């Protein structure tokens, strides 16, 4: 199984778990706290009022927003070892999406830069997972030692544009150590 496929499978499974509402949400309000993942060597400010969720088996915690209908919008993070350039990695990931998800529609793709000048890549799609029509925004960055860091914002497709700005604002605050 190629690495891009495994990465996207992780994102897919995480989205299904969020649909089912099985996330364990912490009590602390993160609206004023920088969320730090020491193992990932990154931090960022989550959207105001969103909460950290521990999910067994995942390396990094998930940030979850208030329910929007029967779905909890969320930001999750995975990392993946890759020798590809960021542009090549983004293209390979994009090609893998239709193999893993139903009804994939690419809405946009463009370079993305954090407030601290870190260059990345942004890919926005709509798809169907677990019977839900979702909108996902992927933020891809070069990490350490050949790792790629992928942040994924997921929300109901009907509300997606409202969340795009929220995800962008949060991802602009990403810092890497």
Image (spheres, helix red, strand yellow):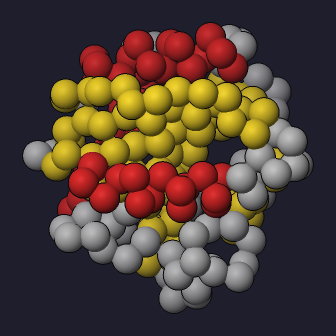
Rendering coords of residue 12 (x, y %):
33, 39
70 is higher (above) or lower (below) than 144: below
Rendering coords of residue 117 (x, y %):
86, 42
Nearer to me, 76 or 168: 168
38 is higher (above) or lower (below) than 100: below
Nearer to me, 165 or 14: 165
Rendering coords of residue 41 (x, y %):
79, 50
Give left or right: position of 136 versus 138: left
Give left or right: position of 100 versus 63: left
* Residue at the image point whose x is 43% and y is 72% from the top: 65
Q: Residue furthest left?
A: 131
133 is higher (above) or lower (below) than 140: below
Displayed quadrant of residue 110? top right
Give left or right: position of 34 versus 125: right
* Residue at the image point whose x is 53% and y is 56% from the top: 165
Nearer to me, 149 or 168: 168
Residue 34 in view: yes
* Residue at the image point whose x is 61% and y is 67% from the top: 46
Q: How many numbered marks, from 0 up?
A: 0
Residue 80 in view: no
* Residue at the image point whose x is 27% and y is 49% from the top: 157
Displayed quadrant of residue 94? top left
Rendering coords of residue 99 (x, y %):
28, 17
Q: Quadrant of the N terminus?
A: top left
32 is higher (above) or lower (below) than 138: below
């Amino acid at each position: 199984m190629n690495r891009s496929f495994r990465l996207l499978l992780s994102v897919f499974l995480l989205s299904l778990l969020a649909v089912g509402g099985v996330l364990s949400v912490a009590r602390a309000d993160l609206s004023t706290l920088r969320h730090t993942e020491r193992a990932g060597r990154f931090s960022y400010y989550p959207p105001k009022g969103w909460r950290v969720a521990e999910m067994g088996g995942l390396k990094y915690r998930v940030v979850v927003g208030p329910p929007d209908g029967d779905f909890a919008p969320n930001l999750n993070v995975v990392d993946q070892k890759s020798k590809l350039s960021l542009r090549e990695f983004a293209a390979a990931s994009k090609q893998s999406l239709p193999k893993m998800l139903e009804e994939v529609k690419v809405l946009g793709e463009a370079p993305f830069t954090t407030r601290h000048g870190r260059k990345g890549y942004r890919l926005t799609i709509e798809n169907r997972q677990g019977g839900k029509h979702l909108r996902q925004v992927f933020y891809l960055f070069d990490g350490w030692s050949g790792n790629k860091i992928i942040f994924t914002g997921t929300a109901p497709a009907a509300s997606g544009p409202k969340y795009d700005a929220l995800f962008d604002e949060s991802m602009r605050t990403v810092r890497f150590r």
